[in-house]
Image (spheres, rainbow, N blue to C red):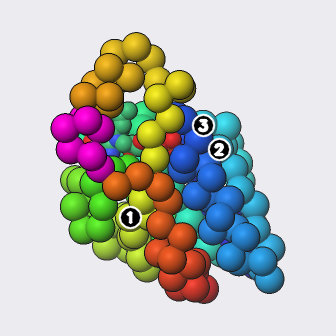
Amino acid sequence: MKTLILFGSKTGTTELCANKIKEQLANCEIDVADIKKSKNLALGQYETVVIGTPLYMGQVTGPVKKYLNLHENELLSKKLHFFVCGLALGQEGVDLFQKQISSQLFSHASQVKQLGGDIHLEKLNPLYKWMMKKIMTKEKPKLGLLDEEIKLFAQDIK
Ligand SMILES: Cc1cc2nc3c(=O)[nH]c(=O)nc-3n(C[C@H](O)[C@H](O)[C@H](O)COP(=O)(O)O)c2cc1C
């Protein structure tokens, strides 16, 4: 049976992370898809579904939220894994994510991991760019995807 990795991404980091997870699962049959374009993708062929989202202002992206609402029942019948990208690392990012999704989906998931995040200033609108420049100067957040965590996350996808 196949594995589906769905990602929501505004500036490409979560998409890159989805592809890094795929690379780690080289021996399995895997599809990677943008959640925005997957509303009607049949889940029947997949035994395992992995869903990744970035956080913006503490929120998962609109397409991810919509998808989870629309497909909650079917996702509850799958092996489910979540990953979160953002600047709030570790448990802090997981806690923010937990507040955003239904408690059934959260507790059904085999794992929920924060896998790092990145800032692509050139892809942000002027307001977000201004905000992020300020945050980066003041707080100097750790940037970049966490390759070791990605490896461990992929190892636990069974
Ligand atoms: C305006 C803005 C708000 C953000 N808010 C959060 C946040 O609340 N929590 C967090 O962990 N990261 C936050 N981030 C960081 C993003 O989640 C991070 O850049 C992520 O890697 C973006 O993923 P994407 O490239 O797939 O869209 C924010 C970034 C921007 C630009």
Find the distance from the CA under tag 1 to the CA under tag 3: 21 Å
Q: Nearer the viewer, residue 45 or 127?
A: 127
Q: Which residue is mark 2?
A: 34
Task: Answer whether residue 138 is magenta in the image.
Answer: yes
Q: Label 3: few (<14), some or many (≥20) within 10 Å?
A: some
Whole-percent x, y for residue 130 in the image: 32, 20
Task: Answer whether residue 156 is magenta in the image.
Answer: no
- Amino acid type, label 1: Gln
Residue depicted at 54% across the width and 50% down the height: 14
CB contact under 8 Å: marks 2 and 3: yes
In the rendered structure, the answer to whether residue 137 lies left or right of residue 46 reads left
Whole-percent x, y for residue 2 in the image: 75, 73
Query: Which label sits on residue 86?
Result: none
> Mark 3 or mark 1, which is nearer the start of the sequence?
3
Q: Which residue is mark 3?
A: 36
Residue depicted at 54% across the width and 47% down the height: 13
Give SS at disc 3. Answer: helix
